[in-house]
Image (cartoon, grey):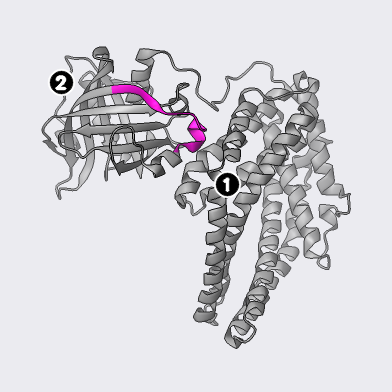
Amino acid sequence: MLEEERKYLADDGFTMPDLGAAGWVSAREPETLRATYYDTPERLLARHGVSLRYRKSDAVPKEWTVKLPSSRAGVRHEYSQPSRGSGVVPTQLLDLVTAYRRGRKLAPAAILRTVRTVYEVADADGRLLAEVADDEVSVYWGRDVALRFREIEVERAEGSRDLLDRIEELLLDAGARAGEFVPKHVRAMEAYAPLDEPVLAAPARKRTVYAGDVVAEAIRRDVTRIFKHDPFARLRETMPNGDTPVHQMRVGTRRLRSDLQTFQALLDPHWTAGLREELAWLAGALGGARDLEVLRERLHDTAAADPLVPADPRSVARIDAALAARQDVALRELDEALHSRRYVKLLDALVGAVEEPRLAPPAWERAEDVLPGIVQRPWRRLVEGGGGVVGAGELTPDLPDDDWHEVRKRAKRARYAADAVSAVVGPEARLLAKAIGRAQGVLGEHQDAAIAADAWLAAAAAEPRDHELAVTAGRLFERERAAVTQARADFPAVWAAVMEDKNIAWLK
């Protein structure tokens, strides 16, 4: 679940203000919480913004909790399971931190004793809006107290962010201090020894940007996407926008392979070849599961495309069941890959790629002098074709599906390249990346429809005596081929928009 909270520091003399302006307030009896945070010797979890905690108290059952970062400050993903005992981490929670610990052993890294008083803020109907926790924290080093601090923690329940703003105003007026969001365990660990720099953190901006800086940032973004979605791919969670973490991991993997190839002139070729090979293995493991996700979603969309002539629900269910069985196999294969030693070694290599990318001499030239010429190569391959592939402007309705697919792959590489250099080139590169993205969307619809059409025919061929299934599959096939035809009709206009001078003048 998502946990949204704000933290404030307070002195010993701080007195909790009257929170009545925020709602109906009731205070719970103070409780004492004893928490042990586990981490690797290098403090890799904390440096990734992750925590693994074992906590017990007199009022709450013992439990283990993992907290994972999100894209919003103060918002974290929280997963808890009952405890079987200190030191015995539940398997699923241990699995969630695989990418962050990467095979390193875990051990107690911080021990906290917190005396907590919780104030519940509710509305007139008794609906819990927020909890305000007044925590007096002691950090232990053996039997000795290494640090004491007082923290006010406001956690959102069913209230709005405006409510949190009102509570914040009351706390600040009473003398609490707002600041950077620092979790308790991080503050505790720093009482023992300063933490090293966050892993995969964006570097500070430089006055002079070299080509290698841009490549390194592209690698960092791609690797971060893989790491960020790893835990959620294991949980099989669907994201709020309907996307899936398997898809996002696959995007990160494919994009990194593409960036390594595009910017090969700036990198050690032997190093990139080995890394791309391992990324191809991971992309294959992700691809099987992702392709079936897409097919199942498309099956139901295509079946419902004409509400006046609905597809036979029994036949649709049979096709979906067959796809679901194949998806289960693909997901098991993905699980095997994500739990393999090979994957852990790849994760280590990816972190190494971010921390010390192996750059070649041209990487030390000024970015604006080098990068436009590098982007020209994937751009020309898209526009002019070559290697048995036609140029994007030469696509015609009578060409095979495979020709359209090859152009789609080249469009993706050109788009990634333009996007990677946009921070240096400026808005012109962003415009080109967006324009190619729209063309890529049409080509993607073409490819998805073509693959689905073949899948529906294969479903009918697998059950030759089921005539209702054959009729349904045929109707689905025709709808998909109609989508292919429509994509081919739509493409010339979106490609003409790509070729507008405002998008490509910087490449000339």
Would you place residue 214 above or below residue 382 in this image? above
Decide which of tag 1 and tag 2 comes sooner along the chain.
Answer: 2
Quarter that holds the N terminus: top left
Q: Secondary structure at mark 2?
A: loop
Can see residue 240?
no
The residue under the point 28% across, 40% down is 84
Magenta residues, as a range?
A: 97-111
Is 98 part of what is drawn in magenta?
yes
Would you place residue 259 above or below residue 471 in this image? above
Residue annotated with mark 2: 15
Q: Quadrant of residue 175?
A: top left
Q: Nearer the viewer, residue 467 or 20?
A: 467
Left or right of residue 230, residue 449 in this image: right
The residue under the point 66% across, 27% down is 216
Indicate the position of residue 311 as horizontal and vertical percent values.
55, 80
Residue annotated with mark 1: 337
